[in-house]
Image (cartoon, rainbow, N blue to C red):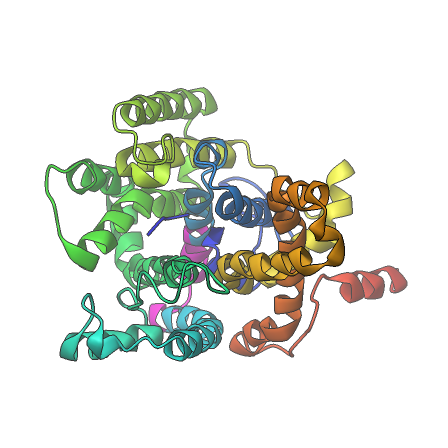
Amino acid sequence: MSHHVSAETAEAAAAETPAAETPGTAPKKPGRDRYLDLLRSLALVRVVVYHLFGWGWLTIVFPSMGVMFALAGSLMARSLKRPAWGVIRGRFRRLLPPMWVFGAAALFLLFAGGWDVSEDPDHGGTWGLVSMLNYVLPVGAPPFPWNLGDKAGLLEDTWPAQAVGPLWYIRAYLWFVIASPLLLWAFRKVPWATLFAPLALTAVVGTGVVTIPGETGNAISDFGVYGSCWVLGFAHQEGLLAQVPRYLAVSVSAIGMAFGLWWASGHLGPDGWDLNDIPLAQATWSFGFVVILLQYAPSWQELPGGLAKWDKLVTLSNNRAVTIYLWHNFLIMATVPIIDLAYDLPLMEDERWSSALDTTYMVWMTVLVWPLIGLTVVAVGWVEDLAAKRRPRLWPNGAKRRRRAGSSQ
């Protein structure tokens, strides 16, 4: 199962994200920090492109999950100024209903395809049936068959792993949420030890020094790889990061990132430089990358200059980040049977046309997946609003809000 979004992505469904305040600065007026919103949107786009093309080097160019866990940790630290239990319950309430809708659709297709969890050699018996509860409350990974159907069928036979696999992120996110009150307490007592402890854990469990089998091992590995990024969000929110001289923070980060690339060079996985397959490289590269992003973070109330034209899409993707993250992989696979319909057209009897479609197939997949994502946002995205106790909206790109603001001036 590959680990990539976004985005991280579930935190984008949380309410307004104020600009972080550093000690000694005047409080900023409340509102969304558009720099953080832009980072979430970039992370989501990167995840979709990664799953389309499988380019491992994208994990180096922009480590989406590290970025998203850091932004989530920052918002969590801010929220924990309120009673912890209420904050945790609110995060669960926001995240679970969209996951239930996706899980219901996935299970319908799995059962329709003939999957029986009690007969599955990897998940059979009583434990397999109990593990189905992870589709309701994902404290572990939900079960699914790695292959279902026929390779020549409507979808390739590995579709369950590709569609359900991204739910690893939901599990990791919820465990970070549960651990956050204790992590934040530890961070305030011993900040540097708490910040670097997950990296030390990754050096043990992510390198084969200690091997923990099964889903427990996966969960602990995820906690180690992304834990320092989550706590880095605490450091950003609490102002600790701002107290570190920029030259020092960037220098140390660069050394850590260089170590990550060096480690990766000697531990390349089946997909080469894909850091998702190299835990220690992923952890150190993501950590250094996020430190630099946050050290140079501007605080934008509005997207500046040429970025302003992307404002509506940035707003939409932040308001529907959970929906986009959950469904994008399945929608990428859904482009294949749609494009394949073109082969039945009469003109495809001409070899030139069919070979042209063969060579441009990935282009058509890339073009088609975005309207499919848009249709899914309209069809089920409003569940995110219900989960957040907001009025359901079909296309929340902020246009109406901006028109109201303009007319009141």
Image quarter of the C terminus: bottom right
Q: Indicate left or right for 164 with 43 as reference.
A: left
- Secondary structure character of the magenta stretch overall: helix
> Which residue occupies the foreground of this view, 345 or 127?
345
Residue 399 on image: x %, y %: 78, 62
Asked if one can make out residue 398 in the rendered structure from this viewpoint, the answer is yes
- Residue at point 23% right, 74% down? 131
Asked if one can make out residue 28 in the rendered structure from this viewpoint, the answer is no
Query: Against 190, is 155 above or below?
Result: below
Q: Is residue 79 magenta?
A: yes
- In which quadrant of the rendered view does residue 96 lie? bottom left
- Residue at point 71% right, 61% down? 397
Residue 121 on image: x %, y %: 18, 68
Which region is colored magenta? 73-85
- Residue at point 15% right, 79% down? 126
Q: Is residue 315 magenta?
A: no
Q: Indicate left or right for 185 with 22 as reference.
A: left
Q: Indicate left or right for 370 with 213 as reference.
A: right
Query: Against 365, is 380 above or below?
Result: below
> Which residue occupies the foreground of this view, 155 or 14?
155
Q: Indicate left or right for 362 with 330 as reference.
A: right
- Residue at point 65% right, 79% down? 391
Residue 109 on image: x %, y %: 44, 75
